[in-house]
Amino acid sequence: MLSIKDLSVAVDAKQILKGLSLDVPAGEVHAIMGPNGAGKSTLGYALAGRPNYQIKSGSVTFNGEDLFEKDVHERAAAGLYLSFQYPLEIPGVPALTFLRTALNAQKKLRGEDEISAPDFLKRVRELAKTLKIDMDMLKRPLNVGFSGGEKKRMEVLQMALLEPKFLILDETDSGLDIDALKVVSDGVNALRAPDRGMLVITHYQRLLDHIKPDRVHVLVAGRIVRSGGPELALELEAHGYDQYLGEAA
Amino acid sequence: MTLSALDIFDPSSYPTRRDEEWKYSDLSRVLREAPKKPLVVRTLSELDSEPDGFVYFSADEAGFDGLQAAADHAMQKGHGRLYIDGNDFGDEDGYLGYQGHGEINVAAGQALVVFEDYTGAFDYAVHSHLRFKLGDGAKLTRVVILDEPETAVSVRQSTVETAPDSVFKQYVFSTGAKFQRFETHVRHAGHGAIVEMNGAYLVKDKRHFDLTTRVSHGEINGVTDQTIKGLVKDSATAVFQGRIIVEKGADGTDARMRHQALILNDGAHIRAKPELEIYADDVQCAHGNTIGALDEDAMFFAMSRGIPEEAARAMLTHAFVLPVADAIEDDVLRETVLNFLENVSEDFYAV
């Protein structure tokens, strides 16, 4: 579903990813773990198309299409969703307006009918209830004044609403207390499906207790240095990343 | 210079760049000679009521005679809303000049909402001076839309005198003109009085907009809050001169000023001069002034959710000035201003 080959990415002339290769088939959840500065967030941003992230070499195909041929919003419409580690505040734009604009923009690009206001509100209301989000909060400008946990719940609400084919979760567990982590993880798990892939970027094993991965990859200094099953996450938790730092250098 | 010193028909009274407060808005350069006086003498309009509960007052050609009677009528009718409709039509051959003065007193305990809607066409030079006076506990909300043509020279000045426990709220929305200055001087009475001086400007092409405000706190325990948001593009110029003076003895003053603007392309200018002059000891004052470009991180965030670049830019640009309009309490006026901004901001979409 998502196939990354020999990807090298520079940010502000600094090489961050150095020949990263990775395949995530449909229906699987892969975790990327690694120390600070390894390039975990860079991978997410590069896939989503953040400006100033320069693709030096390599290729990414998403459902058989060249991902880098597409603009940022086209990647979203094609089904790629990046959940931000620090979701941005959008002053002056009520969350509901933002959500409906995004959903209809994607539908329009895919040649689908736009969702009507009543259908949209019904759907949002259901999702908000599941995610324990107050409808009043959705009338406020998106993420403005929201707590860390509220912002992450909003991220999950957006992914559930937009129904992307592939999710990249960038440090989704950061800033969450135990209860919020459970709500967010349940929301993500509800989206697991045979036709949907996920890439879970995290520092810690903790999130993977809730969102169980099929494969775990260790990212150090811009490269995948080891891949394995779920047990690899436990091993990393016990022994740390030190053993890989020497190898990468 | 004092506000009343300007006479649009007397070029020797025009301020120049040598006058510090007019440094960035040089009227004498734009208006090189006195404008022509109109030939037709305007007739006073009948007081009328609009469906939304406004008393209608025509202020065409800067005619403000009878303004107090209209305001009294509005307050007595119970709705307390006055619609001042100013249309200025000029010539295509040199400026036609209009000048007028008006006064509104809001007596103790009374409340009035004033909506001023100024528009026009062709070449005209207008100067107006309105005086507002509030009694103890009175409340005056002033919502102003300046929707003037790019050929107009417009200087609209006002002085406001508040009283203890009174509330004065001003919201100004402007697209500028060839030369446009909106100036408000407030004498703050303190003793629980609240003053809000808000506004938003969206200025493009070669337009010039100058928003100058002065709030003087002479007494204890006065509150002033000011939020100004602005957008400039093309080769437009916006000037913001906000001055809050806290005189000696005006302890307990709480004054806050914010000016936030976006320059949407190189070539557009903003001259901002926020000033706090504090001569009292026990006060809380703050001012912030930020001028920059659209937040590219927010742009990326919106685009990553599927919103195309142009639409994202439009949404975020529009959203930048909206909070000022959202704060208007009167439902009808809030909707009116939001519609105005919606129409105007369409031109600010593309870079």
Image (tube, coloured by chain):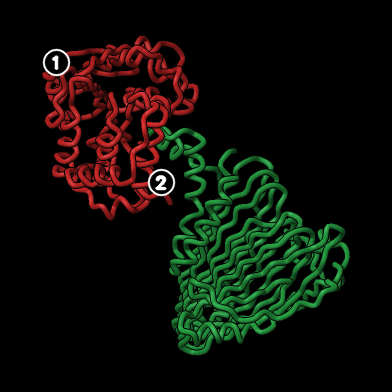
Chain colours: A red, B green
In the rendered view, would you say A21 is above or below B63?
above
Amino acid type, label 1: Gly
- Asked whether, in this view, residue A101 is left or right of residue B256, the answer is left
Closer to viewer: mark 2 or mark 1: 2
| Rendered image: mark on residue A90 | 2
| Residue drawn at (47%, 39%) of the image | B312
| Residue drawn at (60%, 43%) of the image | B264
User: Where is the N terminus of chain A found, in terms of image quarters?
Assistant: top left
Does label 1 lie on the same chain as label 2? yes
Q: Position of residue B125 (x, y in %)?
A: 78, 65
Give the residue at mark 1.
A229
Residue sitting nearer the eye, A53 or A248:
A53
Q: Is residue B80 visible?
A: yes
In the rendered view, would you say B218 is above or below A121?
below
- Asked whether, in this view, residue B129 is left or right of residue A225, the answer is right
Chain letter for mark 1, please: A
In the rendered view, would you say B68 is above or below A226?
below
The answer for how far apart the CA atoms under marks 2 and 1 are is 39 Å
